[in-house]
Image: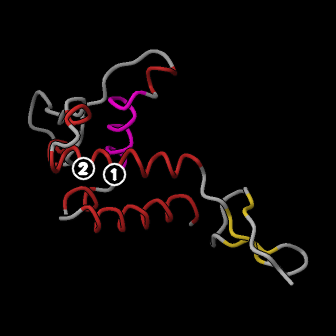
Amino acid sequence: MCHVAWVSGSKVHSNYVKDYTGCQYKQEPTSSWRTDFKLATLAFQSRATGQPDYLAVDLHPHEPQCCLRSSSKELLTVPNCKTMLCSRRFSVAAPCVWNNLPLDLKTYSNSLLSFKSSLKMNLYRRDYI
């Protein structure tokens, strides 16, 4: 009898891994996947509703000096930081994650539920396929 257990491992085409006995084990999502999901969700909420206030204040839209192709990509300004500790701040980490999302995910999601669903699919494809 096989039991499902969490197994850390490398990227595979499925989130289930078979061992030599034929049992399937559910592969654990990476911590970066969870962190990226939380940061992107908070960034979406802050941009869409302005809530919570203390997070919305830290997110600024990217405004280039001249007309560039990147001006239509819904980018956020990433503040300069020189230390690893600084790069973990919400005001730095959230824009980095947000800027790496595809444009259709950022612009065509009209509700938090649809954004989360699309984001999960995007992160799954990024990490497992």
In this rendered view, identify the residue nearer to me: 6 or 64.
Answer: 6
Taking the magenta stretch, the answer to whether it contains residue 96 is: yes
Q: Are marks 2 and 1 in contact (CB under 8 Å)?
A: yes
Q: Which class describes the residues within 10 Å of circle 1: few (<14), some (14-19), or many (20+)? A: some
Residue 45 image label: 2
Quarter of the figure with residue 65 = top left
Left or right of 31 on screen, residue 62: left
Q: Residue at x 16, y 50 (%)?
A: 48
Residue sticking out furthest to the bottom: 1
Give the dominant element type of the magenta stretch: helix, strand or loop: helix
- Would you place residue 13 above or below residue 36 in this image? below
Q: Which residue is mark 1?
A: 41
Residue type at the position of mark 2 = Gln
Q: Position of residue 47 (x, y in %)?
A: 19, 45
Q: Magenta residues?
A: 89-100
Q: Residue at x 21, y 36 (%)?
A: 56
Mark 2 and mark 1: Cα distance apart in space: 6 Å
Residue 112 image label: none
Quarter of the figure with residue 87 = top left
- Would you place residue 120 above or below residue 76 in this image? below
Q: Residue at x 31, y 23 (%)?
A: 79
Q: Position of residue 86 (x, y in %)?
A: 44, 20
Q: Secondary structure at mark 1?
A: helix
Q: Position of residue 21 (x, y in %)?
A: 90, 79
